[in-house]
Image (cartoon, grey):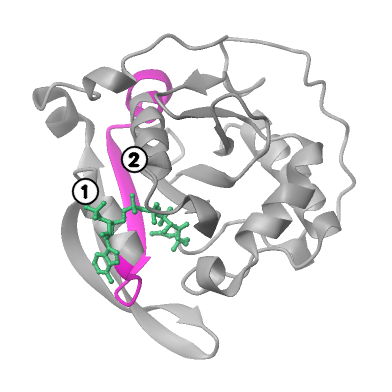
Amino acid sequence: MEKMPYREELDMRVSPGIDESVVSTDWRSGLPALGGRMVTLRDLRASDAASLFAMLTTEEVSRFISPPPTTVEGFEKFIAWAHRQRQAGEYLCFAVTVKGFDTAIGIFQVRDLNSCLDTAEWGFAIGSPFWGTGVFEDAANLVIEFAFDTLGVRRLEARAAVQNGRGLGALLKIGAVQEAVLRKSFEKNGRQLDQILFAILERDWRMAGGPPKEVRRAHIH
Ligand SMILES: CC(C)(COP(=O)(O)OP(=O)(O)OC[C@H]1O[C@@H](n2cnc3c(N)ncnc32)[C@H](O)[C@@H]1OP(=O)(O)O)[C@@H](O)C(=O)NCCC(=O)NCCS
């Protein structure tokens, strides 16, 4: 998801104040924490704004994605927006944390594309100190499993700019299949970039045996 669906300039609402103590099996009421080999994924909290600002606004992270919020306050608004979108059942966003630490170092987003979550699009960004560490693959497998098993997604799409070598390499290594080139489909700094459309089908994923062994785990709550 090169294009973050959140647009700060369009979001004028004040956060209603989410009760984060609620733990529910209904993901719309609150995301479960998912534990992998290296990471724990959990719902975003307002207090993640400062670390996400530090991790995701660097030039190397934001080079091929739509501009993230430019201030800590902008990230607070994004987090409040993400909670509202989750409650509406249209979108969700996991914070990525390294096991044993609570600091958010990245995000994984999933957006409904056809109003019944049959087809969804996902996108991700991780702070560059954690690139090449295995954090991405571990978190990605948790999100894929959550999308197919809990959300009922059957087709999980991703788009990556052709210049985004790491993004393309990351998608290929977790089994996403390149389907098409979307010509001039993404604008970045006044340039129209081509994107590759990738998809992972739930059917293929199950036929391949589902999540890798190390990802088979229980939800933390
Ligand atoms: C996308 C992202 C989450 C991936 O995390 P990561 O830790 O960098 O990913 P990994 O290192 O596990 O995998 C990237 C793979 O691409 C490969 N790669 C790196 N540069 C590449 C290039 N120019 N062309 C092709 N492959 C490349 C790496 O070698 C690696 O494969 P390997 O592990 O088999 O060696 C992270 O790079 C990021 O946050 N990027 C900025 C945000 C972004 O672009 N998000 C949108 C992605 S569609």
Between marks 1 and 2, how big is the CA–CA gap? 8 Å
Residue at the disc numbered 2:
137
77 is higher (above) or lower (below) than 87: below
Residue 64 in the image, given as x and y percentages of width and height: 46, 72
Give the extent of the magenta segment.
146-165
- As displayed, is residue 204 above or below residue 136? above
Q: Is residue 131 left or right of residue 141?
A: right
Location of residue 207 (image quadrant): top left
Give the position of the C terminus as an image quadrant: top right
Residue wearing tag 1: 173
Where, by quadrant of the figure, is residue 87 drawn? top right
Give 171 or 127, whichever is nearer the viewer.
127
Q: Is mark 2 within 8 Å of ligand 1?
A: yes
Residue visible at 67% across and 30% down? 102
Specify whether 12 is left or right of 213.
right
Residues 115 and 189: in front is 189
Amino acid on which the number 1 mark rests in the picture = Lys
Question: Is disc 1 placed on a helix, strand or loop?
Answer: helix
Answer yes or no: is residue 176 visible. Answer: no
Q: Amino acid at mark 2?
A: Glu
Q: Position of residue 91 (x, y in %)?
A: 56, 40
Does label 1 point to a residue whose CB lies under 8 Å from ligand 1?
yes
Q: Is residue 148 magenta?
A: yes
Label 2 crowd bin: few (<14), some (14–19), many (20+), radius 10 Å: some
Q: Are marks 1 and 2 in contact (CB under 8 Å)?
A: yes
Q: Nearer the viewer, residue 215 or 200?
A: 215
